[in-house]
Image (cartoon, rainbow, N blue to C red):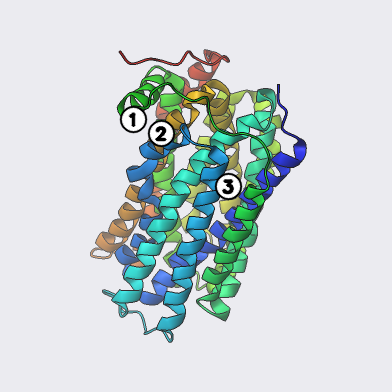
Amino acid sequence: MHTIQPTQLQRFILASGMTNLADGIAVVVWAWIATLLTRDPFLVSLMPVALRLPWILFALPAGIITDRVDRKRLILAMDLFRGLAFAVATGAVALSLPLADPPVDGTAMPGLFATLIACALIVGIAEVFRDNAAQTMLPALVPHDRLETANGRLWSVELVGNALLGPAVGAFLISAAVWLPFAINTAAFALAALLVLGMQGAFRPKSRDTRNWREELGEGLSYLRNAPLLRLLAVVTGFWNLFDQMVVIALVLYVQEVLGLGAQAYGLMLASAALGGIAGGFCADAIVRTFGPGNTARWAQLFSAIAFMAIPFAPNAVSLAIILATFQFAGLVWNTVSVSYRQRTIPDALLGRVNSTYRLLAWGMMPIGLLLSGALVSLSEIVVSREIALSIPFIIAAIGVSILSLATWRPLGRGFRNAVPTKQEIPRNR
């Protein structure tokens, strides 16, 4: 029986929306401020790498901790932790003004660059723990047969902050004062922490008689190993995220140097593209119920490949926003299918560990994609023009996702057709 009142879910979604507004502001700010300190594509990629690298280093510990502690308190602590990191970044940027002109190679302000990398790393670490705990909390707030609807609404609200309002607000703020978006994020995470603090209810998983991190980790790994569809979804999401991050970091320099856009125009373009994702979040439940999760996942993956291939052929910001909106729509539908399946099938006592292992595979590929993108552009410039080099990551990403889609088309359909809707028994290591 679910005793949590609807207002609890609304508070949870509002808090997630607030943190994602801050994340959306940061989407523009982290990458853009890197371009104000250096024009080297590889160094620019290090800033988002610092945000994603913690998924490789801390995903598994985050799963163990999530299954041991009160998940609400863990979310609260991580929001405060991120707010502190942004406060440090605010001071570092404000004290370093005016910024020196960015060199083509290296950075004119290595101290500030290193400080911001460190702050981004702290934000990334906190995000690993926070996001894992948040995904494990949602099944306690809604019945399992409403998870697609709840996840769709949650993803849509998060997209409003992360991709619709956040980038536009971030672009406006950084053009007004480069330290201002970091200060706004400090306040946003503090407000999100207050919203979480006011939530009522117990969100601690069933306690274990003994605590042994190796045994606990082994249970999570064993569960994922014995769940073929979950493994497949993790692998597909991982490679998809790798190619997506190749596109994301290349896009920052592409819109500046090829399309000639400034920070505000770039932010508005991303915000317009987010409308596609918001639509995907609200339509996902109906799409899944109409076509089934298997067909939905397969077509969402294929549409993303088409969107990547179209990016370098976009003549202006409007057409590029439409292309990105198509990708955002497909991505949100995919996320709704995969996340809902995990939440529905994994036992609550194991949800944190299995979810973190899954996301290690899925999100751990992101730093690789970011580094590959910067390296591809730098190497391509040796033999082709800068404009063509900036398009190479889009083409490689499109080819990669196309191959991935073809290779997993039948396994995804077969996996969802044979999926058992009930939760597995918790495996025990002997």
Q: Which mark is residue 328?
A: 3
Q: Residue at x 60, y 54 (%)?
A: 193
Q: Amino acid at mark 2?
A: Ile
For residue 297, above or below residue 30: above
Q: Residue at x 64, y 36 (%)?
A: 151
Q: Earlier in the sequence, mark 3 or mark 2?
A: 2
For residue 318, above or below residue 197: below
**Residue on which the image places disc 1:** 213
Q: Mark 3 to mark 2: distance in Å?
A: 31 Å
For residue 373, above or below residue 302: below
Q: Can I make out residue 364 in this image?
A: no
Q: Earlier in the sequence, mark 3 or mark 1?
A: 1
Q: Amino acid at mark 3?
A: Gln
Q: Residue at x 62, y 47 (%)?
A: 277
Residue furthest right as drawn? 6
On the image, the x and y values in percent for residue 201 come to 66, 36
Q: Which mark is residue 64?
A: 2
